[in-house]
Amino acid sequence: MRHSFFKMKSYLALLSSFAFPLYLAPMEGVTDAVFRRMCKRQSADFLISEFISSDALLRNVSQSLRKMDFDDNERPFGVQIFGYNEETLSLAAQKAEEYHPDFIDINWGCPVKKVVSKGAGSGILQDIPKMIRLTRAVVESVSLPVTVKTRLGWDETNKPIVEVAERLQDIGIAAITVHGRTRAQQYGGVADWELIGCVKANPRLTIPVIGNGDVNSGEKALEMKNRYGVDGIMVGRAAIGNPWIFQEIRNAINGQSFSPPDYAERVETCLRQMEETALVKGERRAVLEMRLHYGGYFKGIPNFKERKVKLMKAETVRECGRILGSLQVNERTG
Ligand SMILES: Cc1cc2nc3c(=O)[nH]c(=O)nc-3n(C[C@H](O)[C@H](O)[C@H](O)COP(=O)(O)O)c2cc1C
């Protein structure tokens, strides 16, 4: 427990460098190093890898190992792992520790069937004693702080998050992120911040509580912060194609107005992301992956639909650049 105390202290020290920490949510297929750095430049504080299978990590699958690559500018940086077996998860955490992140995050929230059916991700929410046992094993196997990201519970009739958070604190986790949905909800419905607020309001809980779910504007973030008193906010989907969301939130918290990026800046940032991604993953993958981001980058731009159709079919960075470049020219002259 003494050991856990120092790990908690070291996580608190990380937190204390920020007035109110903003987290970029881990998102498989989205939050690679290129995108994380873009968000960091726009005022995101804590960054976390995409989730990594502990089995794959131990088999040295290169794609999984690559997910742990990060540079010092990304700190505080956490590696997120998932799994369903005590030994595998602990060994994977030790392996992740060799990459020197600032913390290890355990994913107990993924709702995807393939993950859940094995009892990993949010599947563990059907067996809380096992969740506690596996988490404890990870906490005891590494010297870095261990955090947990999870959901309210399994379904509407089973939302034990207040008690779960306390039990996880007792076995030594350093912080908890709560996504305000159940597994049954997947990504539907509305995130229940009232229950996140109950986790935070529990007088026996002293570890930081990070709230997550549906934060998509500075105004909303400020409201959640003030109403529920969480120690930080994590933003996922609203950051896709919109790394500026963090600056917008930061400004709202500081009582400052925010000027959204103009079209030229959006185009420049989008192309930069595409080019940097191509350097790391190759052109084909970069072009495919960027298709997820256009909706965010060009939301609200009049008459963009036609260009988006073209972008979704484009196969090279150059072609995308030409389509987006033409937008820039039109916007400047029109
Ligand atoms: C495309 C996508 C991929 C995701 N991948 C992960 C993941 O790897 N690990 C994780 O803990 N959560 C993952 N999530 C969940 C998010 O981290 C976050 O909890 C969820 O999207 C709710 O936050 P939001 O409403 O701000 O998007 C993913 C979500 C999306 C949309």
Image (tube, grey):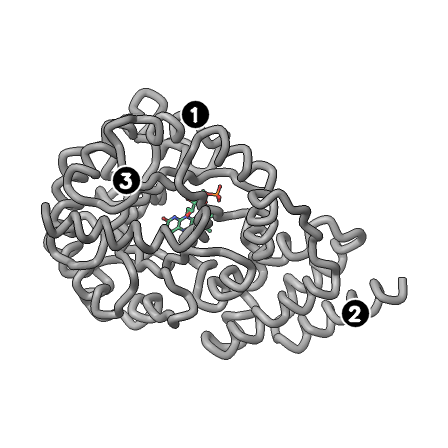
Q: Amino acid at mark 1?
A: Glu
What numbered label is drawn on residue 194?
1
Tag shown at residue 207 = 3
Give how far apart the Cα atoms at labels 1 and 3 are.
Answer: 18 Å
Q: Residue at x 42, y 32 (%)?
A: 185
Q: Secondary structure at mark 2?
A: helix
Q: Residues within 10 Å of mark 2 (few under 14, many from 20)?
A: few
Closer to the chain start, of discs 2 and 3, is 3
| Residue 51, placed above or below residue 213 | below
User: Which quarter of the image is occupied by the C terminus?
Assistant: bottom right
The residue depicted at 38 percent of the width and 41 percent of the height is: 210
Gap between marks 1 and 2 measured at Cα: 46 Å
Mark 2 C-beta to ligand 1 under 8 Å:
no
Q: Foreground: 88 or 269?
A: 269
User: Which residue occupies 30% across, 72% down?
Assistant: 62
Task: Mark 2 and mark 3 in contact? Answer it, CB < 8 Å.
Answer: no
Q: Earlier in the sequence, mark 1 or mark 2?
A: 1
Q: Position of residue 320 (x, y in %)?
A: 67, 71
Q: Which residue is mark 2?
A: 326
Amino acid found under the numbered disc labelled 3: Ile
